Image: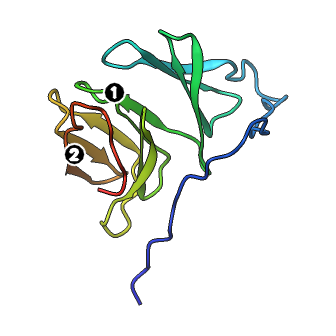
Amino acid sequence: SPERPFRVRYEVMEVPINLPFQKPPAEKPNPKQGIGFLSWSNDSQYICTRNDSMPTVLWVWNIRQLELTAILVQKDPIRVVAWDPTCTRLVFCTGSTHLYMWTPSGAFCVHVPLPQFSITDLKWNSDGSCLLLKDKDTFCCAAVPLLPESSEYSSDE
């Protein structure tokens, strides 16, 4: 029988919460610690960061209001993160069959309907209409709808 995709969803949690943390291995010299990734949104309002001691956690900061906007906790380590070049939309992958997205209106997951396709890398095209998704041996292009000007985006659509 063909493998059925499992349901993936975000659960909104109340603060305070405990975040998954990894101690650096004592036997490895120069372990990765601190902020290993950070990137500006296209409108320079947001920054996303990932701490190497918390590889499954993505932090989204509102720089104009100087506050934390979202903490996205994944099951697996976050591999690649990329802002849409045209609007405030963040996409990222964890090496699973799902593509994860965040906008100021919320976060959601999209299952890639290709058999045995695990997203290990991704890149936006210049106008934000298409994503290149890469697996170990193959790749595919995903058409991505543009967000409405109002930035009110619903994952129900």
Of residues 48 and 150, the one nearer the viewer is 150
- The x and y percentages for residue 90 are 39, 33
Q: For the residue carrying disc 2, how many other residues have a C-alpha within 10 Å: few (<14), some (14-19), or many (20+)?
A: few
Residue at the (83%, 29%) spot, across then down: 27
Q: Which mark is residue 63?
A: none
Judge whether 145 appears above or below 43 on screen.
below
Asked whether, in this view, residue 88 is left or right of residue 19, the answer is: left
Judge whether 94 appears above or below 63 on screen.
below
Asked whether, in this view, residue 22 is left or right of residue 55, the answer is: right
**Could you say which quadrant of the image residue 122 lies in?**
top left
Residue at the (42%, 37%) spot, across then down: 105
Q: For the residue carrying disc 1, how many other residues have a C-alpha within 10 Å: few (<14), some (14-19), or many (20+)?
A: many
Secondary structure under the numbered disc 2 in the rendered image: loop
Q: Which residue is mark 1?
A: 88
Secondary structure under the numbered disc 1 in the rendered image: loop
Amino acid, disc 2: Val
As drawn, the residue found furthest toward the bottom would be: 1
Amino acid, disc 1: Thr
- The x and y percentages for residue 59 are 58, 28
Asked whether, in this view, residue 58 is left or right of residue 31, the answer is: left
- The x and y percentages for residue 50 are 58, 26
Of residues 31 and 68, the one nearer the viewer is 68
- The x and y percentages for residue 91 are 38, 38
Q: Which residue is mark 2?
A: 144
Judge whether 127 appears above or below 93 on screen.
above
**Could you say which quadrant of the image residue 128 lies in?**
top left
Quadrant, the N terminus? bottom left
As drawn, the residue found furthest toward the right would be: 26
Residue at the (68%, 18%) spot, across then down: 34
